[in-house]
Amino acid sequence: MAQAGFSKRLTRYYAWYTLLFIIFLISLAVLEKEGVPRAWIGYLFMFSTIVIYAGIGVMSRTSDISEYYVAGRRVPAVFNGMATAADWMSAASFLSLAGGLYLQGFDGLAYIIGWTGGFCLVALLIAPYIRKFGQYSIADFLGTRYAGANGSNIVRVLAVIATIFISFTYVVAQIYGVGLITSRFTGVDFSIGIFLGLASILVCSFLGGMRAVTWTQVAQYIIIIIAYMIPVTWLSAKHAQTQTQMPIPQIAYGSKLSQLSAKEKLFASDPKEQEVRAIFKQRAEVFQQKIQHLPASWEEGRLELQHQLDELKSGNASLIEIKAAARVLSNYPKTPQEAQLRWTDAKNNNLARAEPSVTTYMPYAAKDKNESDIKRNNFLALVFCLMMGTAALPHVLIRYYTTPSVRESRESVFWSLFFIMLLYITIPALAILVKYDIYTSLVGTEFSKLPSWVTYWASIDKLNPLVNITDINHDGIVQLAEIAIDGDIVVLATPEIAGLPYVISGLVAAGGLAAALSTADGLLLTISNSLSHDIYYKIVDPNASTQKRVTISKLLLLVVALVAAYVASLKPADILSLVGAAFSLAASTLFPALVLGIFWKRANQQGAIVGISVGFIVCVYYMLNTHPLFGGSVLNQWWHIAPISAGVFGVPAGIISMVLISLMTPAPDPRTVDLIDYIRAPDV
């Protein structure tokens, strides 16, 4: 009865919260109509939402060990599902997934299928059993399950290392996203934006641990879903007035697929489009010539730019022209090796834009059967890695320690899937409707009449424009081949593309910020709790008081957060690829040990040590050997599998090695067998 009353109070509190947030949104819309500057709207959105999250953190502060680590194990299934969905909806999911579908089409569905399928594995294979175990972390479960007769902590330490490695990469990406969104919509410096967001993260997780993080994530999910639904529904209604007459985006976008395919065929046969693609091909050939004549071509180019700058200085050139020429010279490659890398990238980009568009709405669409087979294999490999990785992500799994019972942990996974589904079935709709809007309202437009959102997004990053629309063939008309859009801005730019007021742009930014903050909260807490509980308490000082354990966790949280913020402030390259690769690492290192530890009594400590190590080594070796970011080459790929799917080799390697070593070494002791029987027994 007490739990039922608690659930009713939560429902009432969050109903009022949702109503007040809608009133706040309407108030900002009124202020915009009355002429309040856009910058102030952005400030109000960013800082008001951060204050809300910080306020929940302050109200939820605690030093109780159970409340701090697992929210007192009293979070109702529905609310834990909302918190898990917010924890899961990182900046990558909120901002980049629609952009991936916009650019990749069917191939981008691998992320949606893999991630949702992963939660099915969580429900069937892991969540109920770790809840029955009833401790505080994933490393705690693995360390206890594989302690052996001598009570060794080797597996516990390996699990903590894997947890830190996977979670730290994630949290850097989230803090980076916080800085990006805050700086773009408030005008503050990127580094300042990072630390503003970090302050909100720390207030939530530092003061109240899992209790504060849980109730903050529920509030963040409400903002995330409102921010995503309003612009896509408006865009759907915009086209329904003259086309489908069906303003429900999840249904309306289906009718647009055939129209987009027809338009792309029309564009491909347009002489002007072919003219633009021919220019891109010529540019690629120029870069190829430069690459072939290195290092002489690099030296000639540098001398030519220096000569041009000297001529401008000695002539009557304006200061602006001289500064522009000096900037071009300073950005020139410093060495022939750097020139080769940059010119190769430029050549490949031009070749990609020179290719006639191939429809991306059919499964594994390609120019020939061999390329189609490669696409299919990569699609299935990515789905496999994302499913296994999702089922082994520590920051997701620890959420199921917070429910009152094993039964509610199962129900919680259902609600997690339901709340994630609300967003995931909308993402393809947004991607298709935005593309349809661009094809119908932007392609064929005169360059002198480009919409304002193009100029705005192109001006944010001068060196690497997020939107680049250039009149390549100088005919004054926008062709499809002349449009280059960064996938990460598709969601953020949707309100402006749809013609919505700026207040909705601020709402979407607030949604992206909520997604980044919610995931960062969970990840930081996962890292600090693993260090404080599994290393400090279980190994260093088993006699530590509960107050000391919580204090150590808070101090570690602060240190990890500051280190992650510093790394994020360096603007690490290709961070989203690293986050994607983290799924393969989670799958390769933790998934075999978790599943075999629950369902195979013969799995032992020696097998777990070898299985975790071999899975990690195989996965990392393949990534380093095949990913250009790490100095690898695509020529080293096995069966043309992309490095992001390295787990397709790491998982089997981990399972096989774990099974073989377990069979070759003594069986687990009776205490371990009793533990397995206990966690697998029905909860009564």
Image: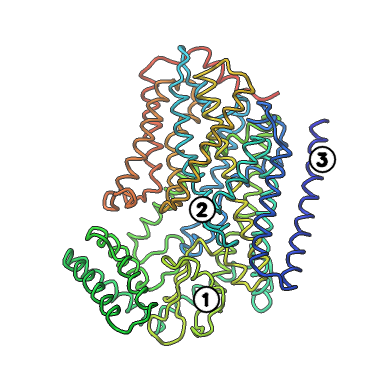
Q: Residues within 10 Å of mark 1 (few under 14, many from 20)?
A: some
Q: Position of residue 621 (x, y in %)?
A: 32, 40
Tags 1 and 2 touching, CB below 8 Å: no
Q: Residues within 10 Å of mark 3 (few under 14, many from 20)?
A: few
Q: Gap between marks 3 and 1, in whole Å?
A: 48 Å
Q: Which mark is residue 535?
A: none
Instruction: Indicate whether 276 appears above or below 683.
Output: below
Q: Which of these two is toward me, 58 or 346? A: 58
Q: Gap between marks 1 and 2, in whole Å?
A: 36 Å
- Secondary structure, mark 2, is helix
Q: Position of residue 319 (x, y in %)?
A: 38, 77
Q: Which of these two is toward me, 252 or 303? A: 303
Farthest residue, direction bottom = 475
Q: Earlier in the sequence, mark 2 or mark 3?
A: 3
- Secondary structure, mark 1, is helix
Q: Position of residue 233 (x, y in %)?
A: 67, 66
Query: Which residue shows up at 53% across the image and 38% down it?
Result: 391
Query: The C terminus is located in which quarter?
Result: top right
* Residue type at numbered disc 2: Ser
Disc 1 target residue: 439
Q: Is residue 434 left or right of residue 684?
A: left
Disc 2 target residue: 191
Query: The N terminus is located in which quarter?
Result: top right
Query: Which residue shows up at 82% across the image and 40% down it?
Result: 8
* Residue type at numbered disc 3: Lys
Q: Which mark is residue 8?
A: 3
* Residue type at numbered disc 1: Tyr
Instruction: Indicate whether 215 appears above or below 573.
Output: above
Tags 3 and 1 touching, CB below 8 Å: no
Instruction: Indicate whether 192 appears above or below 285.
Output: above
